[in-house]
Amino acid sequence: MSKPSEIGLAEKTSEGQQVGLRGLDRNVKVLGVVTLLNDLSSEVAVRTLPLFLANVLGVKAGIIGFIEGIAESTATLLKITSGYLADRLAKKKGLTLWGYGVSGFTKPLLYFADTWGLVLVVRFLDRVGKGIRTAPRDALIAEVTPAQDRGRAFGFNKAMDKVGAVVGLLCAAWILFAVESGQGTLTQTAYQLLVLLSVIPGLAAVAILAAGVREPASSHVRAHGISVLSWRSFDGRFKAFLGVVILFTLGNSSDAFLMLRAQTVGLSTTEIFLLVAAFNLIISLTSMPAGILSDLLGRRRLIIAGWIIYAIVYFGFGLATTAWQVCALYILYGFYYGAFQGAASALVADLVPAERRGTAYGLFNGAIGVTVFPASLIAGLLWQWFSPAAPFFFGAALAGLASCLLLLIGDKSDG
């Protein structure tokens, strides 16, 4: 087993390293398809859920925020617990399957939703599924992928996730256009059609995962004698990286603020919907190439590049005054996601022992999830107390600071 100190922040690729899908483990490819189908289902049924609550059920904004807050907090806490269990029980496929299954079998209940209480229950269970599956899925990808290909493998998974998002958004837009004939608000009939559309890919994702993913033989080696978080057992550079990510995330508020900013310069709801689809398309196109670059040039460099792009984009959002400027910045924002997500996931695997990866991914995803709440609260207060530009200047400043701190974590192996 390679120790974190032997791996370093960037691992050099061997000669003849393959590109594209060639050489990726079967599990990685199957999980990519599962991710695509699940995200397609979620974009169709869940992306429009706030509109359903407001337009059909007449729910106030405070209740909508309460539902989302409960849902995301649940996912965050379960990511940490599930990551630990993946190491402790050595059942990464089983936990991943349970996670996708809970989401896939509960989303259809939204068809019958006639009160916000039922929506809360379904949204809660959907996020329970996400919380259960995220860490063991990432640990499973890392376990079956050689170190020199991890960026490519995680980049592929992130790309497939966003392909599903693009297809789901475009399908939803087409159905709404066909059913509502230009009506400004969402109707119950239209939303029920969206839920029905989401059922097929959601259940297909569960079936493909059950039949196509195999538990690696090495997964049966359990991690014994460790506490729930076992903070002391992690390499110092993993802890430092986690701290820098938390600092960055404090300035990375909910993307809802980007949509609100787009409205302030005159973009319509339909235009924003299509812009988000284009944004996801950019992520899907850049995630795998960026992951390969992280294998070649080093994870740290790609992450810093992503954060620099983020700083430029957020500073630009603070200054933007026209619709075309916001559109251009939103598209550029997709390059940040492409550069950061795959490289960051691969770096977590590089910095921890194999038997601790589930817990590490739980801590990594959990730390981001916990920090998103204060980040969005800070952004909202800055928007309200100062100006709509203030939260974007704040986010740009923290991204710049995080980039500088990440430079200090590197070692001779990176570069």
Image (cartoon, grey):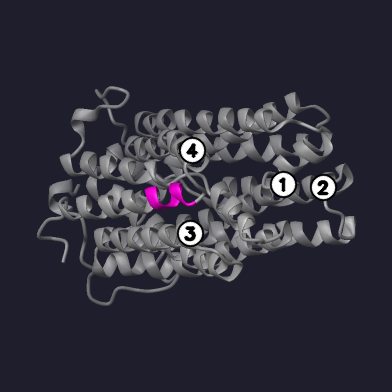
Tag on residue 48?
A: 1
Q: Is disc 1 in contact with disc 2, using a CB cutoff of under 8 Å?
A: yes
Q: Which badge, 1 or 4, is on the more N-terminal residue?
A: 1
Q: Nearer the viewer, residue 24 or 383?
A: 383
Name the residue that disc number 3 marks. Answer: 317
Q: Is residue 95 visible?
A: no
Can you tell which quarter of the image residue 241 is in? top left
Question: Mark 2: which secondary structure?
Answer: loop
Mark 3 is surrounded, within 10 Å at the Cα level, by few (under 14), some (14 to 19) or many (20 or more) other residues, namely: many
The numbered dot on residue 186 is 2
Tag 4 or tag 2, which sits nearer the N-term?
2
If you read the primary sequence from the N terminus, does the residue marked by circle 3 or circle 2 appear first? Answer: 2
Inspect this view and state whether residue 109 appears: yes
Residue 380, horizontal then vertical, whole percent: 51, 39
SS under mark 4: helix
User: How many other residues sit within 10 Å of disc 2, few (<14), some (14-19) or many (≥20)?
Assistant: some
